Image: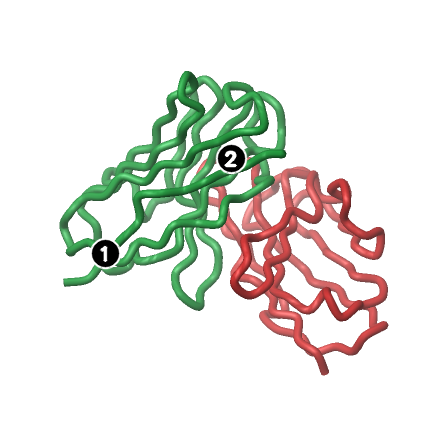
Amino acid sequence: EVQLVESGGGLVQPGRSLRLSCAASGFTFDDYAMHWVRQAPGKGLEWVSGISWNSGSIGYADSVKGRFTISRDNAKNSLYLQMNSLRAEDTALYYCAKDAQWLATSWFDPWGQGTLVTVSS
Amino acid sequence: DIQMTQSPSSVSASVGDRVTITCRASQGISSWLAWYQQKPGKAPKLLIYAASSLQSGVPSRFSGSGSGTDFTLTISSLQPEDFATYYCQQANSFPFTFGQGTKLEIK
């Protein structure tokens, strides 16, 4: 069974940094792209960032480009999101999601349960 | 960036009704489109991928169609468990983008 467990969320002041982690199990991690998707309270889904299986292709939403960095450690079956210069509008539940296609970037299945990031002074 | 526009933003329907949700891309995305269902307090669930392929385990009352810029999600006969919010997502190119969501409510 595929499991994705996010961690690292919490309350942080504006301008500070936070690093999210996603521990993956139940599949061959280095065969799949991975993504971060967020959802602000009461709002819709926003794709944040994605990384291909070999880290050769990386993408970011315009809203986080230059502030967030996605990375992965295939030896540790882990995905990361380094978030710098955090803003109030970054407050959201952050989901880790596995790409559904082998060696491609496409749609997301499954998703983790999310980790909550709150940016406030 | 590719913008995804869903309509309607909300719809009220009854058990047994047929419901159609549309999603329009700001530029052609071939069949690089997925549909998700999200229930309150839960992570989204993949329903349809590649515009019209049913994800394993998803009931056959769900179907998707379209290509290029115009897509639809149809639920042929609504069941009580189908009342949720539905999102489309384009996977044609980074940055990936979602529609704003359609909330399906009980009439």
The chain identifier of the residue carrying mark 1 reads: A
Chain A takes which shade in the image? Answer: green
Q: Amino acid at mark 1?
A: Leu
The chain identifier of the residue carrying mark 2 reads: B
Question: From this viewpoint, which residue is outermost toward the bottom?
Answer: B107
- Expressed as whole percent of the image width and height from the top left, the position of residue A26 reads 58, 28
Query: In which quadrant is the N terminus of chain A drawn?
Result: top right
Instruction: Identify the residue position indicated by label 2 in the image.
Output: B93
Tag 2, which secondary structure? loop
Query: In which quadrant is the C terminus of chain A drawn?
Result: bottom left
Tag 1, which secondary structure? strand
On the image, which quarter does residue B8 sit in? Answer: bottom right
- Name the foreground residue: B64 vs A81: A81
Q: Amino acid at mark 2?
A: Ser
- Expressed as whole percent of the image width and height from the top left, the position of residue A11 reads 23, 56
Please rate how many residues cluster around mark 1, counting C-alpha atoms within 10 Å: few if below 14, some from 14 to 19, many from 20: few
Q: What residue appears at the point 52 percent right and 62 percent down from the top-left corner? A: B41
Please rate how many residues cluster around mark 2, counting C-alpha atoms within 10 Å: few if below 14, some from 14 to 19, many from 20: some
Q: Is residue A40 above or below residue A59?
A: below
- Name the foreground residue: A79 vs A5: A5
Chain B takes which shade in the image? Answer: red
Instruction: Identify the residue position indicated by label 1 in the image.
Output: A11
Q: What residue appears at the point 70 percent right and 49 percent down from the top-left corner? A: B47
Q: Is residue A106 above or below residue B18?
A: above
- Name the foreground residue: A8 vs B15: A8
